[in-house]
Amino acid sequence: MTLLRMFLVQTKMHFVWYFRRDGEMMFWTLAMPVFFLVLFSFAFSDSGTSRASAFLVPGIIGAQVLSSGFWGVGVMLATFREKHLLRRIYVTPMPPWIFFASLVVYRMALLAIQALLLIAAGALLFHVRITGNPVEIVLILLLGTATFVSLGTIIGALARTTESANNVASILTVPLAFLSDAYVPIDRFPHAVSGALRMLPSTQFIETFRDVAVGGQPLARYGVWLLLLVLWTIAGTTISARTFRWV
Amino acid sequence: MLPPQTRCVFHGHTTVDRTIVVEKLVKRYGELRAVDGISFSVAPGTIFGLLGRNGAGKTTTLECCIGIGKPTSGTIRVLGLDPTRAGDLARLRPRIGVQLQATSLPEKANVREVLELYAAYYRIAPRAEEMAGRVGLDGKLDRQIAQMSGGEQQRLALALALQHEPDVLFLDEPTAGMDAFGRRILWNEVERLRDAGKTIVLTTHYIEEAERRSDRVCIIQRGAIVAEAGPADLIARYGGDASVTVVADGFVPGAALRGLGTWTKTGAEWKLATRGEPGLALAAVVTDANAAGAKIASLDMHRPTLEDAFIAITGETLGEGETE
């Protein structure tokens, strides 16, 4: 009961301090993705804005999952350490997993808002229909979040400063957004290139999510990729837990 | 060299009658020995001041006691628990209160939220209003950290250390950057806790505060303890003589005054160095001068302070290098 209260208060505070009172954060997480959706839907509209948008809605949601892990958790943790917040928390009796869980749940809540906003924008502006099984959609989103949060935490664990965490996150997030079938269909690349890009966990996650959400595919068809994402999650969590520093 | 009895030695106290026992603590950062074999123990109901220049090893010692720093070697017990062991540390954390030197709280958090979050950490009922009142932040519960002065943030950090009524309080440079109001609040709270039998360990480089407020002072120099005793004992042992200086036309110390100590004359100024009570010597000088009809031009008395003792012990002043 008291642990639950600790978790709930901490999660609420993350939400209030780092989202609700942070106008810049609201702009980047809510306005920008919708802006990109509209912009790219028209830019890639050679076979119709609706088709482009059906590709982009899950793609941009997937890209948000990536940046949620790398920026929202990874860089955030490095900032917390640099500002000496982590060492202050470390001397309190709060179990570390409560802190991490609350950070992840806060980002998941934020992702849910982002996803609903993008889905609504896609439906209203471009008639994108989400046809997949809602349970399977939620499952693949949860798995993707777990994967990229655990990988992002490695950045937070290893980066010495906020600046270096920022650099690593940028180097990962920006190219991956374009190479993982999020904004640009990788099938336009030569076959060998797109084949290689499909080895990336980010590509596997985004394509699975898209095929389930708007492609009418069952999640079970992507068993191998799902297993690989689970393995990435286990690896990320293990490395993070071994290398994480509070001070 | 100091006589051996003043060196801080671990006297074989068990952890039962001592709140904190630190034995042969060494903390190395690469080649640098930040703490080089420190041993001390703290009795319950004591305000224990770690005094020394910046970089002497005070903060490192304190951080090792609360589990932030891992000692290179040596043993530490706080409330009988070993902060280097995860299980002990978990049992220790609810019982200690900590104010760190470099704490920054989330900028967009307000006073009430931070106090309520920490109440949740310690699994106690929220008491934000009461705590804010105690540290002079009443009426500022909705103030965000970014809009608070450094002193106000320090007082909030103090409230976070006190809120769960810890058995041991660790304060790292708690009065640095605090105004007189903040210091009064801090010392009131610290002394109230001490009077309730709790133990307070604090680092400071404000020597007057260490002298007035600590029950025991531990002087640290270059990672080692060079003296440890009550401030009055340190002053009596190392502070040197008290002095009375007088300038009075036609004044010459008589036999009775000569018996009080050593007189020297520099120009028109007579100076008495005495081991006795300087106040009494001063009164005797006034009486003598009046009896001799000597008109006193100036009269001054100096009682040795902890600063005198500090300089005698370390060969350094504390004032330098205060940029941290």
Image: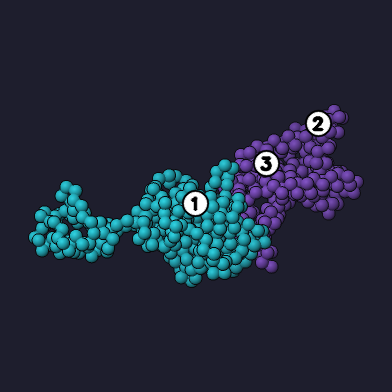
Badge 2: residue crowd in 10 Å (few <14, some 14–19, many ≥20): few
Location of residue A100 by image quarter: bottom right
Residue A46's label in the rendered image is: 2
Q: Position of residue A177 (x, y in %)?
A: 74, 37
From mark 3 to mark 1, how far is it between C-alphas?
57 Å
Amino acid type shown at disc 3: Met
**Looking at the image, is B223 positioned above or below residue B286?**
above
Are circles 3 and 2 on residues that touch, CB within 8 Å?
Answer: no
**Chain for numbered disc 1:** B
Q: Position of residue B212 (x, y in %)?
A: 38, 61
From mark 1 to mark 2, how far is it between C-alphas?
76 Å
Q: Position of residue B130 (x, y in %)?
A: 50, 67
Residue B224's label in the rendered image is: 1
Left or right, residue B63 beside residue A68? left
Badge 3: residue crowd in 10 Å (few <14, some 14–19, many ≥20): few
Depth check, front residue: A39 or A196: A196
